[in-house]
């Protein structure tokens, strides 16, 4: 068993990660537009302050100790910002690296093997001059499906997973059942499927479909928990009854600001803590439903405490 876990503020004892929200964000933004437009695009200090307030709230009201920030390199990952938010809020933040589904120009001529070396270096030696090591990897397929460039990004992160054995969060678009195509690539590159999280599984309540991935050894991320989550709770209850409690993770896919959405920072600022999508929904909405449905606190704690820690065992970045 690993004794320590890497966070944005350094290593902590594995026992200290406590209650974990397994997939959240502070920002999902374009680095290029932020560099070009500065605080006209979004106000950095205000975003940090809003993030600190939200994390303090979920720590005090719900007992959350740790969030895993699932922001990949090309979606605005900002290590110094995460460090400040963690320091001021008192919540541990675990870093990710990887590629989002945006078909960036650099993907066109580079091979997966070439790109993978840069991500492996981050995992082994730390990000730039920060020394912070990611504990999670990220890849993504969305409503365009697995295009040639998306395939290349998936292959890149498959290589990184194979070489580091870090957990790989796979963002998916379940209306197109994209995990099936992703998993073909992962198997071809000898990815450890017991380290794969099928992301946004809360977008589906199809038990047979979800069990396809569980039988391969994957985890399911019930990571878009909104205030209206009764159907998710029923799905989770059924999966637990079928013996899958060791393979579930809970969180919100929350962010302070996402610049691809149809709002400005000024419009978003006042809504950061609104109840329909905030960091307390797992504890204040989902868990009460689960209790009503007969799920025990011990089973819930597996998703919030035991399973995230189990995913981080046997990685090669320590």
Image: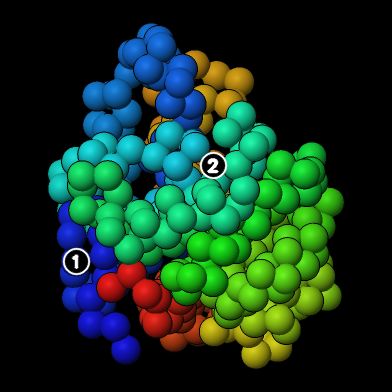
Which residue corresponds to the image point at 84% horizontal and 51% vertical from the top-left? 176
Which residue corresponds to the image point at 61% horizontal and 29% vertical from the top-left? 105
Q: Which residue is mark 1?
A: 11
Pointer 1: residues within 10 angstroms few (<14), some, or many (20+)?
A: some
Say whether disc 1 or disc 2 marks the residue closer to the N-terminus.
1
Give the vertical position of 91 relative to 144 (above or below).
Answer: below
Return the residue nearer the eye: 117 or 62: 117
- Give me the C-alpha separation between circle 1 and circle 2: 34 Å
Q: How is the image coloured?
A: rainbow
Secondary structure, mark 1, is strand
Q: Which residue is mark 2?
A: 276
Residue 122 is situated, as x and y percent measured from the top left of the image, at 35, 54
Return the residue nearer the eye: 288 or 100: 100
Give the vertical position of 38 relative to 106 (above or below).
Answer: above
Q: Quadrant of the C terminus?
A: bottom left
Secondary structure, mark 2, is helix
- Looking at the image, residue 136 sits to the left or right of residue 83; the answer is right
- Looking at the image, residue 17 sits to the left or right of residue 232; the answer is left
Q: Is residue 5 visible?
A: yes
Which residue corresponds to the image point at 18% horizontal and 60% vertical from the top-left? 10
Q: Quadrant of the N terminus?
A: bottom left
Return the residue nearer the eye: 279 or 318: 318
């Amino acid at each position: 068993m690993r004794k320590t876990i890497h966070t944005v503020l350094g290593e902590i004892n594995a026992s200290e990660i406590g209650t974990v929200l397994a997939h959240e964000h502070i920002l999902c933004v374009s680095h290029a537009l932020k560099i070009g437009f500065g605080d006209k695009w979004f106000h950095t200090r205000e975003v940090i302050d809003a993030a600190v307030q939200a994390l303090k709230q979920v720590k005090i009201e719900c007992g959350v100790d740790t969030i895993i920030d699932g922001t990949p390199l090309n979606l605005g990952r900002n290590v110094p910002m995460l460090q400040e938010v963690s320091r001021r809020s008192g919540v541990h933040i675990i870093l990710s690296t990887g590629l989002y589904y945006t078909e960036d120009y650099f993907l066109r001529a580079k091979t997966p093997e070439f790109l993978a070396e840069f991500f492996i270096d981050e995992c082994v030696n730390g990000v730039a001059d920060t020394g912070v090591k990611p504990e999670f990897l990220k890849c993504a397929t969305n409503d365009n499906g697995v295009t040639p460039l998306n395939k290349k990004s998936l292959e890149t992160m498959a290589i990184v997973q194979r070489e580091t054995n870090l957990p790989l969060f796979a963002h998916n678009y379940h209306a197109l059942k994209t995990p099936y195509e992703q998993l073909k690539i992962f198997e071809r590159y000898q990815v450890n499927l017991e380290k794969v999280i099928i992301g946004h599984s809360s977008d589906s309540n199809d038990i047979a479909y979800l069990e396809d991935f569980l039988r391969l050894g994957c985890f399911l991320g019930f990571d878009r928990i909104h205030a209206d989550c009764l159907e998710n709770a029923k799905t989770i209850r059924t999966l637990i009854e079928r013996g899958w409690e060791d393979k579930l993770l809970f969180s919100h896919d929350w962010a302070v600001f996402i610049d691809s959405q149809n709002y400005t920072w000024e419009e978003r600022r006042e809504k950061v803590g609104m109840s329909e999508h905030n960091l307390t929904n797992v504890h204040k909405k989902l868990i009460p439903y689960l209790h009503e449905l007969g799920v025990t606190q011990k089973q819930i704690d597996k998703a919030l405490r035991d399973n995230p820690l189990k995913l981080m065992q046997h990685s090669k970045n320590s």
